[in-house]
């Protein structure tokens, strides 16, 4: 046996090593012997609890040795006492012997042994509980008792069923805690007496052998001891309630019936009356209730209600219940509860709750007035928020958390008395997520970013200053005029200053004009002579064509064309040298032609006058036609006192081509704005104002005229002013857009006069240059020119008035005899 | 003694009338256009307040003078107004002619005017009662006066508008009956007294509501 054991152990150990190496399974856990017990001290059983199986099928082996022997035996019977047990039958059980018992668990990998358990059979005796326990009621009129019967516990070994057991009973009333224990002896039945009638008892039995322990208690047996008197118990009135303040119902709870069929009657008296009434209706409101319909319901009266339970033995009456129906009104819950989400104007959702009073309640009669209360909570919330609503049947809720689901209930109550109804059924509403929050976040981010960008930009602007500004907004160069009137600066009249800088009077609405201004540069030099260059002969054969085509290709129109503009830009850069040469030639020509500027002025003024009549014939108009047939345009140039200024009109497009022809084609066309000597500066300014104002007005007016077929073809478009850099003679070259190859040019022999102001460009035809008041000259041509202009002015006084929209007062002054020639007044004269 | 008491009563009544005037006269002056419905709403609210006050006072009295019987409805309790035949259910109240219902309301109020004044004087001797209860009792007494004036005003208005007939005038003269039953009131315990009053104030309120909804079914009925 030992050898066998050791060999098997070795094998299992080997197996275990192999298995562990391969799979990671382990040997079984340690089993534990739970108890050993003998039912009758002739046999006994041991039970163990297996340990962990190590993931493999495990077999358990029980080994035992007796204290007197050294041999180790294995369990004789694993079956009888169930799984994980070992049954020692009579043959293997020896009294007065101590058994040393161990359990070994084995699997493929290894084995594990329990701790040894030492067992003395006599000390582990405990029988099973008795079986077949029963109670029997024995009722007689005089006495009541119970027969309790049972059987001794069964044994597996039927043959040895000769043991003597001692029994014990215990009992108690059902509701009590303490048991009463009765020693029965060896008999298997017992008569229980002295039990209380009407009480329900619990009874149990157990047994033991003459030695050893008591068995477990048997299962509980319950028995109701019948009530001897059989009087019904006192019923209890639970409550009375009126659902609509018109009828009411009372409910009661019956007591024990006493073993006899029992009748319940509800009796009541009304306040101030002696008569006892019985319930009019036991049925309508269900069992154990009484319904009082309208007829039986009085208000402001106290009902004294009792319920009587009656059986054959007698009757018992409940405690009285006093009812004033007014104060037991408890309505049904409100119905038709609807939840509706609405959006307010600011898109915030709000909840509209509506409900109806319970259908039973007749609120329209005024008899019952209901007040409502609602409660709500988020679905996952714990606490209800309760809102008293009053008598209205709708409610608006505004402060709900978006994205949450709410549970809402409503109940109602009569005003001033009664009690709250049950809560209505739960209503759920999902408050939609407020998208505005997200929107707001987005907008806030956008706002912050953009403001940041603005900040950075303005910061760089400040740092980089001009460069940035110049980059973004190219500078609008005024004419560089040396010797800006310091008086003007001192007096600080900004408008004058602006106009002096030449940027005010220009029609401000078109880029074209800005561009044009760019090319106006006026310089002076000390020793310039008044020179004017012009073509000797002015072929007037093309005059008709000029007149026809003037309008069709106005300067403005071409200005608006970007390609042209760029072209002009290029050409204008190329121009100065050419012009320089031209001017030089012009000077010489002038000298040769022996025309003084003054005379030219006179001549030109006369020409203006003549122009009114003769322009159609173009006899005197100095216009030249180029081979490319560009329509001529009149450069309209007025100088106040510009002996040193050379004005010329050059068609940009043809300027380089013109060079050769200029001598022929150039014509002088000076229009002099006459200024008197000793002219008061203020008046000058006033005039200036009026002119500028007129300019703007006229620009507006002339715009539509651009395309107007009625535009007088004689109107001259003053298209471009080229700046001419000339060391020798300062010159302003005015370019005619439409001038077909004709370049008109003034070379004004300079004295020491400084030309300080470009007062305005009037009606985008006339550039008005204002002389420095200090250095004004009286030109020879002044008087005739003045006459001319005066006449024109007078004739046009009314028209001027209409032009002067912005500064009417100035206009009036001018109209009423200003000594200045208003450039604008020329315009009508051309018509 | 009796004349002095009467004088005192008269003085109290005058004071109350003055109070009523002070409280309500400006409103009346500025509200010639008050509709009957408005007036009804006012008297109904007023009666509701009276009822609430009496409920509170009743609870306080019960606390200070526990009833000998520990139950709510002692059979011995008998109100001095219980002799008056008043409708004790909705349908009766709806069937009774408007004039009669109006008259009943006025009668009920009238029946409580004097007993309440007595009660006020009487209750002041109870040192153990809190001031709050005393002021409640006083307030109730004043408000009953006001309510009666208010109901009379509504009645007048209804009569002038032809809503109810003028037959009420004859009935109103029989107010003296109120005095005869008011003596019974003196026999009651304080809490019984207030209990009875509370009940009648509830009656008045219910009748007013019924009356209003009968006359103007469209206005929040």
Image (cartoon, rainbow, N blue to C red):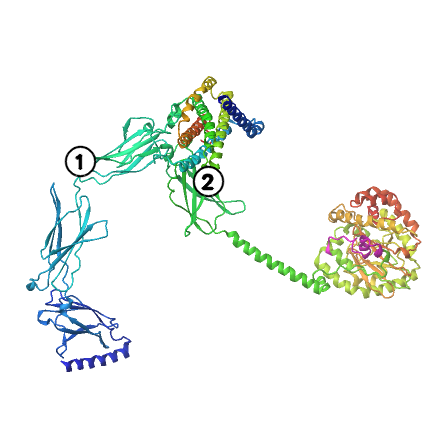
- Mark 1 falls within which chain? A
Q: Is residue A90 above or below residue B167?
A: below
Looking at the rendering, the stretch of residues picked out in magenta corresponds to A488-511
User: Is B34 left or right of A635, judged from the image as shown?
Assistant: left
Decide whether residue A499 is among the magenta residues: yes
**Distance of label 2 from label 1 (alpha carbons):** 55 Å
Image position of B135 with respect to A658: above or below: above
**Would you say A631 lies left or right of B26 here?**
right
Q: Is residue A15 above or below residue A702?
A: below
Residue A770: percent from left, percent from top:
85, 54
> What residue does disc 1 label?
A313
**Residue highlighted by disc 2:** A389
SS of the residue under disc 2: strand
Residue A498 in percent (x, y) is at 80, 55
Q: Where on the picture, by quarter, is residue A113?
A: bottom left
First along the sequence among labels 2 and 1: 1
Q: Which mark is residue A48?
A: none
Provide residue B67's location: percent of width, then percent of height: 37, 35
Residue drawn at x 70%, y 65% is A463
Which residue, as the protein is rendered here, is positioned at the far front? B1
């Amino acid at each position: 046996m030992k050898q066998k054991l050791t060999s098997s152990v070795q094998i299992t150990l080997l197996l275990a090593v192999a298995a562990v190496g391969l799979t990671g399974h382990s040997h079984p856990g340690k089993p534990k012997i739970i108890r050993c017990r003998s039912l009758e001290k002739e046999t006994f059983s041991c039970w163990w609890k297996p340990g962990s199986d190590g993931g493999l099928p495990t077999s358990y082996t029980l080994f035992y040795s007796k204290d007197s022997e050294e041999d180790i035996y294995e369990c004789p019977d694993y079956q009888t006492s169930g799984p994980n047990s070992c049954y020692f039958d009579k043959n293997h059980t020896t009294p007065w012997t101590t058994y040393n018992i161990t359990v070994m668990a084995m699997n493929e990998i290894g084995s594990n042994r329990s701790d040894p358990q030492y067992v003395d059979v006599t000390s582990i005796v405990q029988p099973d509980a008795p079986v077949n326990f029963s109670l029997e009621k024995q009722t007689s009129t005089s006495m009541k008792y119970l027969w309790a019967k049972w059987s001794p516990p069964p044994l597996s070994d039927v043959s040895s069923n000769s043991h003597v057991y001692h029994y014990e009973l215990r009992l108690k009333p059902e509701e009590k805690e303490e048991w009463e224990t009765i020693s029965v002896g060896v008999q298997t039945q017992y008569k229980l007496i002295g039990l209380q009638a009407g009480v329900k008892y619990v009874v149990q039995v157990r047994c033991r052998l003459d030695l050893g322990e008591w068995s477990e208690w048997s299962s509980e047996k319950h028995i109701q001891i019948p009530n001897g008197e059989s009087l019904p118990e006192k019923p209890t009135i639970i409550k009375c309630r009126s659902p609509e303040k018109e009828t009411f119902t009372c409910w009661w709870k019956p007591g024990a019936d006493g073993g006899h069929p029992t009748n319940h009657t509800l009796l009541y008296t009304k306040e101030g009356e002696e008569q006892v009434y019985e319930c009019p209706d036991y049925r309508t409101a269900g069992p154990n209730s009484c319904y009082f319909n309208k007829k039986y319901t009085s208000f402001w009266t106290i009902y004294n209600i009792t319920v009587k339970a009656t059986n054959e033995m007698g009757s018992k009456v409940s405690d009285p219940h006093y009812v004033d129906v007014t104060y037991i009104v408890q309505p049904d819950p409100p119905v038709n509860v609807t939840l509706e989400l609405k959006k307010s104007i600011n898109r915030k959702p709000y909840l509209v709750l509506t409900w109806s009073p319970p259908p039973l309640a007749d609120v329209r009669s005024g008899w019952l007035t209901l007040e409502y209360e609602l409660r709500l909570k988020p679905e996952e919330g714990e606490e209800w928020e309760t809102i008293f609503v009053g008598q209205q049947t709708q409610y608006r809720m505004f402060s709900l958390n978006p994205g949450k689901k709410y549970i809402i209930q409503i109940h109602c109550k009569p005003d001033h008395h009664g009690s709250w109804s049950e809560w209505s059924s739960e209503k759920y509403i999902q408050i939609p997520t407020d998208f505005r929050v997200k929107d707001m976040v987005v907008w806030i981010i956008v706002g912050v970013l953009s403001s940041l960008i603005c900040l950075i930009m303005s910061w760089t602007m400040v740092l980089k200053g001009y460069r940035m500004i110049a980059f973004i907004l190219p500078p609008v160069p005024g004419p560089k005029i040396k010797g800006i009137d310091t008086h003007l600066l001192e007096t600080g009249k900004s408008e004058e200053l602006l106009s002096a800088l030449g940027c005010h009077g220009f029609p401000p609405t078109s880029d074209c004009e800005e561009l044009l201004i760019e090319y106006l540069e006026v310089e002076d030099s000390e020793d310039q002579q008044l020179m004017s260059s012009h073509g000797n002969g002015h072929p007037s054969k093309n005059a008709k064509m000029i007149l026809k085509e003037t309008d069709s290709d106005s300067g403005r129109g071409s200005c608006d064309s970007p390609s042209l503009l760029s072209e002009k830009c290029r050409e204008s850069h190329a121009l100065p040298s050419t012009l320089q040469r031209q001017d030089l030639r012009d000077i010489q020509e002038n000298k040769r032609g022996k025309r003084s500027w003054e005379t030219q002025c006179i001549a030109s003024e006369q020409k203006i006058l003549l122009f009114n009549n003769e322009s159609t014939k173009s006899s005197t108009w100095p216009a030249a036609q180029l081979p490319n047939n560009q329509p001529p345009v009149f450069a309209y140039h007025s100088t106040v006192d510009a002996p040193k200024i050379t004005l010329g009109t050059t068609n940009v497009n043809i300027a380089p081509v013109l060079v050769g022809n200029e001598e022929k084609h150039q014509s002088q066309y000076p229009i002099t704005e006459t200024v008197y000597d000793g002219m008061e500066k203020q008046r000058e300014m006033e005039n200036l104002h009026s002119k500028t104002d007129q300019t703007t007005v006229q620009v507006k007016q002339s715009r539509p005229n651009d395309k107007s077929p009625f535009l007088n073809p004689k109107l001259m478009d003053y298209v471009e002013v080229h700046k001419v850099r000339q060391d020798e003679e300062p010159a302003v070259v005015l370019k005619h857009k439409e001038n077909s190859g004709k370049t008109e040019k003034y070379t004004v022999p300079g004295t020491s006069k400084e030309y300080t102001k470009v007062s305005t460009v009037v009606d985008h035809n006339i550039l008005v240059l204002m002389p420095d008041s200090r250095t004004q000259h009286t030109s020879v041509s002044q008087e005739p020119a003045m006459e001319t202009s005066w006449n024109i002015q007078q004739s046009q006084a009314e028209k001027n008035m209409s032009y002067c929209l912005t500064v009417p007062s100035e206009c009036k002054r001018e109209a009423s005899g200003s000594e200045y020639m208003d450039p604008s007044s020329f315009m009508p004269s051309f018509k | 003694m009796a004349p002095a008491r009467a004088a005192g009563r008269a003085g109290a009544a005058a004071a109350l009338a003055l109070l009523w005037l002070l409280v309500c006269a400006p409103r009346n002056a500025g509200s010639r256009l008050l509709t009957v419905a408005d007036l009804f709403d006012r008297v109904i609210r007023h009666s509701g307040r009276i009822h609430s006050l009496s409920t509170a006072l009743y609870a306080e009295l019960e606390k200070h003078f526990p009833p000998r019987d520990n139950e709510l409805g002692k059979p011995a309790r008998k109100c001095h107004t219980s002799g008056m035949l008043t409708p004790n259910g909705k349908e009766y109240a709806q069937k009774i002619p408007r004039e009669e219902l109006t008259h009943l309301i006025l009668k009920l109020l009238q029946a409580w005017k004097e007993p309440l004044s007595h009660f006020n004087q009487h209750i002041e001797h109870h040192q153990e009662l809190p001031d709050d209860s005393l002021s409640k009792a006083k307030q109730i007494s004043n408000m009953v006066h006001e309510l009666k004036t208010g109901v009379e005003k509504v009645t007048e208005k209804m009569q002038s508008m032809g809503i109810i007939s003028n037959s009420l005038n004859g009935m109103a003269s029989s107010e003296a009956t109120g005095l005869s039953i008011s003596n019974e009131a003196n026999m009651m315990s304080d809490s019984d007294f207030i209990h009875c009053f509370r009940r009648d104030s509830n009656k008045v309120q219910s009748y007013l509501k019924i009356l209003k909804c009968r006359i103007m079914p469209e206005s929040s009925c």
